Amino acid sequence: MGEVLRHSLADRCMHWANAVLWLLLFITGMGLVQHEALAPFGQAYPHLLRRMVGGGGNLLLVHITLGCLWMACFAAYIAFNWKNTVFFLREVFSVQAGDMIWLRRKMPLMVFGPALAARFGLGTTLPPQGFYNMGQKAFGMLNVLGGVTLAFSGGIMAFGIGSTWLIGWCVTMHYIAAGLVFIGLLAHLYMTLAVPSERPGLRSMFTGFVPESYAQSHHANWKL
Ligand code: HEM
């Protein structure tokens, strides 16, 4: 059996640029949070980061610059890969019959294994999935909605557009969106890095290709 293309070069570059920029935005963003109750790593981390870049003003500038670079990468990707963008959006936002059953059954199957899941009376057969499985679709939706929220709220805060009331809401929305995408990211990292049966998917984020047998077993409804 041969190999099939799953991720084009442009898709892979976009994915890794997004991953690196997300990491940097998270690192710098956490350094901007100074309120006692909201700083997840306490006060030492923001103080250290601010000292490293020469103050809070500079740290904010770095964060905004990274955010603009992140948006520019997406704008360039969308402009030159319109067909792939439409494909991605259509795939992640189309929930098919059986997708929710897949999601419900996949978690216990991964945690307990098929034998124990069967003993608990849980279903062990997974409905066939398309190009993305329901877990990937949910994370894709979160990325799109979270990304748009972060870009809009970040833009309004950075350029001080609108009233104090609007900026206040943007701060809240920025925190919530970043927090939700971060939670989704933990599941994404677990699925892609720790689950052995997903290894071909991980390899495809570097080489572009997956074995045909993997495409058929994991994404039977993907029209090759
Ligand atoms: C070390 C970090 C990361 C690793 C190892 C990783 C791994 C992967 C892999 C293997 C896939 C392909 C899954 C498949 O098609 O079977 C994927 C897709 C995806 N990842 Fe990541 N990822 C990382 C970071 C991120 C970050 C930070 C984000 C966004 C916050 C992200 C968002 C996505 C999205 C939206 C997709 C679907 C897009 C596509 O298939 O082109 N990833 N990731």
Image (tube, rainbow, N blue to C red):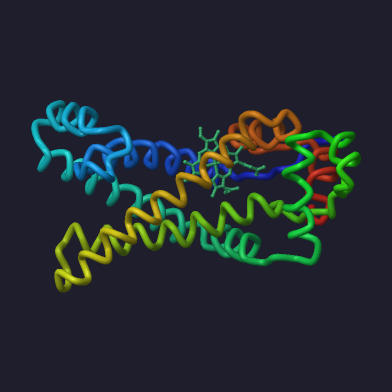
Depth check: give the residue in front, 96 or 16: 96
In the displayed structure image, the side of residue 20 where residue 144 appears, left or right: right
The residue sitting at 60% across, 34% down in the picture is 190
Above or below, 71 relative to 193? below
Quadrant where the N terminus lies?
top right
Seen in the picture, residue 90 relative to 180 is either above or below; the reply is below
Q: How many marks?
A: 0
Occupied quadrant, residue 74: bottom left
Q: Is residue 93 above or below residue 176?
A: below
Ligand 1 visible in quadrant: top right
| Left or right: where 50 falls relative to 136 | left
Q: Quick one: 70 or 35, which is closer to the camera?
A: 35
> How far across and down, in percent of the image, does residue 60 sit?
17, 44
Which residue is painted at 79% across and 35% down in the image? Answer: 211
Residue 73 percent across, percent down from the top left? 38, 50
Which residue: 82% across, 40% down? 212
Q: Position of 33 compared to 126: left or right? A: left
Viewer-proximal residue among 117 and 163: 117
Along the viewing direction, whichever of 83 and 93 lies nearer the viewer: 93
Residue at the image point whose x is 56% and y is 36% from the top? 189
Q: Position of residue 138 (x, y in %)?
A: 61, 56
* Residue 136 % position (x, y): 64, 50
